[in-house]
Amino acid sequence: MIPFSPPRIDQKVIDEVTAALQSGWITTGPRTKKFEKEISAYCGCKTTVAVNSWTMGMQVLLAWWGIKEGDEVILPAYTYCASANVIIHSGAKPVMVDIDQKDFNISVENIRKAITPRTKAVIAVDIAGFPCDYDQILNVVNEPAVRSLFSANNELQEKLGRILVIADAAHSFGALLHGKRSGALADITSFSFHAVKNLTTAEGGALSFNLPGNFDHEEIYKAFCTMILHGQNKDALAKTQKGNWRYDVEEPGFKCNMTDIQAAIGLVELERYQENLDRRKKIFDQYSEVFKNKSWAILPVYETEEKTTSYHLYLLRIKGADEVTRDAIMQKIFDRDVSVNVHFLPLPTLTAYKKRGYAIVDYPETWNKYQNEISLPVYFNLTDEQVQIVVNAVIEAIEEVL
């Protein structure tokens, strides 16, 4: 069986995790701090805070920004449930909009149409690792007419003076827009380092900050280190200093700090990340080289003059297929011992959001792309021979069903 997306766990990772275990630091410590600095250097952002998941990082971020009941946060209907769940848990309303025709990302024009005086943030999702049009989104929220609609709830929002632009970059670590890396494209970026991601820490994530110059990013880093540790103003590393045991809890916080065991994996992954991207690009190109000759294939956009994906997911679409046909094709592929997937079940198709009044008929482009999409295996250890097996299984299954 060819799996869909196994992590790359080899002796180098095992040795580094073992070293972390033997060091005596298994919670947040020197490896986590090093990992944060190396992410900032790689992405070109101003500061980074490592957390235990994308979800909790985003939850803390929304709380810090003051997102609350009565507020609205715009996001695409085509994304994983975590993108909307965090908004619900903050007390705000998720305002879903449809995606672009040209790719799987949020439509800038639909963002513009959805903005109201209640809008406090936009969460743009880099589906499959392909960056959203952040320059255009930032242009929209900076338009005088849009800025005049904005109503600040607190000092942070007043300092920015406009809608906050957040990148849901769970898929896009290493992606490029105009030569700048994901992590430096939006005001704040939330990464996922879950087991299936390009760069994994088993579970984990990071918040990368790139706010305007009037924000003190060193103070932001300190504030988040406190917030992700119950609001406690000293972590375990600081408390090891002689006589430095006493601490304070400044506000009721969260508990979502990254551990040094997780960071140990991440440091190895980051050190060889370009090697990972290069292999993933080769797999993407191998798929495209074969499928471009098939009349039923709609190939994903993953490189343009402006953008380069992180090669996280290869989203193949089957021309003319509906949901039932797509599912039948997938079963035929599974029967050939090849794992495939769908990214994603759109938010308005999920019970949690249907019962909140969202309906997929309001998002035609989302449905159009979802119903005929199949995600193919892409990972470092996928061999050329296995790629050929995947290709054969997909072609045979599609031509058998269509």
Image (tube, grey):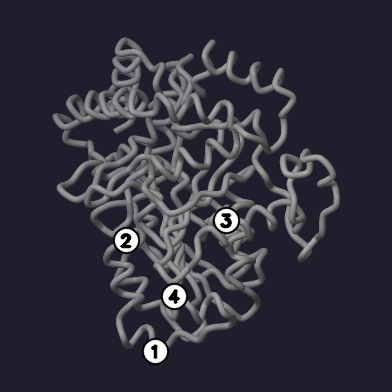
Residue name at image x 54 percent, y 46 percent: 206
Residue topped by disc 4? 163
Q: Does label 4 or label 1 sit earlier along the sequence?
A: 1
Q: Which residue is mark 1?
A: 148
Task: Check disc 2 and report its element: helix, strand or loop.
Answer: helix
Identify the image quadrant of residue 253. Answer: bottom right
Residue 332 in view:
yes
Residue under circle 2? 134
- Residue 79 to residue 7: above or below: below
Q: CA distance from mark 4 to mark 3?
A: 21 Å
Q: Earlier in the sequence, mark 2 or mark 1?
A: 2
Q: Amino acid at mark 3?
A: Tyr
Secondary element under disc 3, as helix, strand or loop, is helix
Vertical side of 315 occupied by 143: above or below: below
Residue 74 lies left or right of residue 373; in this view the side is right
Name the residue: 54% across, 10% down. 11
215 relative to 387 in the view: left or right: right
Label 2 – label 4 distance at C-alpha: 13 Å
- Going from the N terminus, do you reach mark 4 or mark 3 first? 4
The mark that comes first in sequence, 3 or 2, is 2
Circle 2 residues within 10 Å: few <14, some 14–19, many ≥20: some
Q: Nearer the viewer, mark 1 or mark 3?
A: 3
As measured in the structure, the alpha-carbon distance from the residue carrying label 4 to the one carrying label 1 is: 11 Å
Q: Nearer the viewer, mark 4 or mark 3?
A: 3
N-terminal of the pair, mark 2 or mark 4, is 2
Q: Residues within 10 Å of mark 4 (few under 14, many from 20)?
A: many
Question: Could you tell me which secondary element the residue under label 1 belongs to?
Answer: helix
